[in-house]
Amino acid sequence: MRQHIIWRELAEPVPGLDGLLEATQVLERQGEPLPGIGERLVEGNRFAVARHGILGTALGDQIHGLVVQGILVGHTRSLAGCACRGELLGSSVSLLAELAATIRAAGPAARGFPFERWAWRVFEYQYERNPAYRQLCDRRGISPRTVARWQDIPAVPAAAFRQADLACGPAEAVFRSSGTTAGDGMRSRHAVPSLDLYRASAVPTFAHFLLPDAVRLPMLALLPPPELAPASSLVRMCAWVGEELCTGVEWFADDTGLRRDALQARLVAAADSGEAVVLAGPTAAFAALFESGWRVRLGPGSRLMDTGGAKGMCRPLSRAGFLRACWHHLGLAAYWCVNEYGMSELCSQRYESVLHERFAGASLAPRRLLAPPWLRTRVLDPDTLEEVSAGAPGLLCHHDLANAGSVAVVLTDDLGRAVDDGIAVLGRVPGAPARGCGLLLRELDER
Amino acid sequence: MSADERADLPAAPTSREIARALDRALEVRQRLRDRSPRETATALAAAARRWIEDEELHRGLPAVARLSAPMVGSVLPRVAAALDVEAMVELVNRERGMSPPPGLVAAVVASNVPALAVPAIALGCLAGAAVLVKSGRGDPLSAPAFHRALAAVDPELAATVVPAYWPGGTSALEQAALARAEVVVASGSDLTMEALRRRVGRRLVAHGTRTSVVALDIRRERCLDTLVRAVALDVVLYDQRGCLSPQVALVAGDREAFADALVRALAALRPILPPGEATLEERAAIRLAIEEASWAGAHAVRAGLGGTVLVETWADLRPGPGGRTIRVCPLDSLRALPTALPLGRIECIAIYGDEVDVAALEARGVARLCQPGRMQDPPLAWPRGQRPALGSLLRPDDPMRTLLDERTLPASAMRTCPEAP
């Protein structure tokens, strides 16, 4: 059984607690507010501490004065004699919080993630709280009671994010797709009620695919800082990654576009000192950097995450060409270059497997876009919307549990195919509006 | 095998072969400089009649153009009909003026619909130029077939025409060929045109992305059935792939009834003009349009065997996905039509009803008005993008625009029920 509680003043070990407490947020310590520390896990009467956060060591008996908001999974009766006070929270907050805790506890490498169980719960939740989505389901005669398989949960077209607010509650942030040619009305608008859930999904996934060696490096972002691009989900993610996984973020774009000189100077400094760095940004921004013909050899262990594909590029550049250019201009071998596939409408991302697999000793595996276990992608026949046979091309339809606060199933404008346990993106459907973070810098240029 | 290595595509010529062919074409053209326009027009018309009988063309075109054989059989005569002797002579008299003919006109023809090479050759010949026609990979057959037909009726004139095909991205060959042309006429996406303009400069007559619509006032309707069948034909021909194919029907009146009737009319045309095989991208585009419309409302999608009609609640004039899919959008009256149109993006309007403000449509950049059912029968004089068909070859950097000519569609015709297709 589950109970949502605020757990206060845990002065003594909990007697006989054989359940599991997934605390999603430490609210207060010794009377001081501590918002946003992240999850703590209480198993029996023993704290297990997640890998990150300010209280990054086992807490043991240092837990006096903590006020923790979380979800209790276990026997409430066993709490009766303990020094804690339970209080039920509204479930609209708690499902998102519970899912965030589950995602954090599982991590991107989890086997046996309870995807289907969560898919049902999230569908019920969204059907109940998202009127626009419910209308679509009702028109199709589909409800949580009638759906037999998770694959039958209705998808919304990505275009719906241009037309309606699809949030299940008040939004903590609204992310918008970039796109210069289509005009403001053609931009997607993703209202996100729980940034914590987005963070719970995005940050560990980045760590898994970009930092499999668990190093902490400085991040150099070919992006504007959050204050200049508050509606960019990519910028938000990079800020979190910089904060949690790196030694910090340096932003190399502003309202005039890419600050090429500053970036080049920083890269030269890094190369001279042998300092490894994480480069992150739109593919188009890297292509713009390469245009000048300038070269540097970055220190060992440096790596690069690019996203957005050819959108926003002055000249088309194939993937192979891009990887060659990374070697030529930055001295980065292809396995240090990881492409990210994300959308402003999704809170989870896919990444190329290449770096993670190299560290896992599987260098010969094909380059493909892998996802954390809470994101599944189906490749659909455009005529029937049924799944195509393995390896055949079709429309990509993502089922992202981290989108629990809006709509989990999104039919995209992208064509792709399954490659082993991942996917490859083949391109966009003709006529689909130009969009994506590749256009972000161009937008800044055009301001 | 990549698309450009398909066995049914002709081999690309070498730069030297193209250069030799152009030398010869220019030399013969010089000899023909005193030919009368009527003599040229007569030869072109005779060639057109011969061209539509070309067996090789009928055999090969359905596969390369991805159109059904009945569709090919239907559209080739429409193309040939535009090469009418009197119409061609009148066009020359109206637009040729005193300008000297260009030496070489190069036409880079788009691939979306077949046989675009034929009017390109005809206009080049009427301008008094040698013509290089670079076909797209969707139809590398029409130009050589027309060249064969012309050679049979007028070998000298045929010698001034060089049909060629080479895959996109063969830049050295393209550079060499286009460098010799005094005028380059090209159609394709805005992006392609932008890239071409950088290389060709002011010699380029560019026809970028434009689309067409139907505008109907059916509030006091007398002939809805005929109108709907005419619109269905406009949609179906060329599988809706051309810039003259309507993507949107703006309707003043009962849109729901119109949509229902249009779905039935599209279904009725399917066995007569079956669709060609659609690519994954085309099918995906249709699916996304349907899903987007489904999102908007329960009754928005009328999907039938012959095509799909999306009933919109606002004037959504975005280019559609093609594949016989049309949006039906509300319109208060035809007087409100000009303000509903995006500036400079609409090529042709098939129109029916009163109160048409032709001058206002012209100001929005509309190049052609016609009756429903006639959208795919443009005359050779069709001023694409409001550029005079022949005049733009003679004076490519002249910004002159041809005004909509009401003689091609008198106001009375806008109120006349179209002929049953």
Image: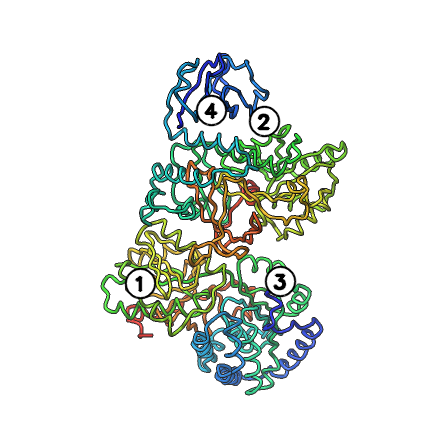
Q: Distance between the residues labelled 4 and 3?
A: 70 Å
- Residue plotted at (59% across, 82% down): B158
SS at mark 3? helix
Mark 2 Cα shell of 10 Å, populated few (<14), some (14-19), many (≥20): few
Q: Name the residue under label 4.
A: A21
Q: Where is residue A140 in the image (x, y as percent from the top left)?
A: 33, 50
Q: Distance between the residues labelled 1 and 2?
A: 66 Å
Quarter placement of the C terminus of chain B: bottom left
Depth check, mark 4 against mark 1: the one in front is 4
Depth check: B215 or A222 in front? A222
* Residue B215 in the image: above or below residue A52: below
Q: Distance between the residues labelled 3 and 1?
A: 41 Å
Q: Name the residue under label 2.
A: A51
Locate residue A421 relative to residue B312 in the image: left or right.
Answer: right
Q: Are marks 2 and 4 in contact (CB under 8 Å)?
A: no
Q: Residue B200 carries which label?
A: 3
Quarter placement of the N terminus of chain B: bottom right
Q: What residue type is labelled 2?
A: Arg
Q: Is residue A196 visible?
A: no
* Residue B388 in the image: above or below residue A45: below
Q: Name the residue under label 1.
A: B216
SS at mark 1? strand
Depth check, mark 3 against mark 1: the one in front is 1
Q: Which of marks 3 and 1 is nearer the N terminus?
A: 3
Mark 1 Cα shell of 10 Å, populated few (<14), some (14-19), many (≥20): many
Q: Position of residue B288 (x, y in %)?
A: 43, 54
Tell which subunit mark 4 falls on.
A
Q: Where is residue A267 in the image (x, y as percent from the top left)?
A: 71, 36
In this rendering, do the residues under marks 4 and 3 share a single chain? no
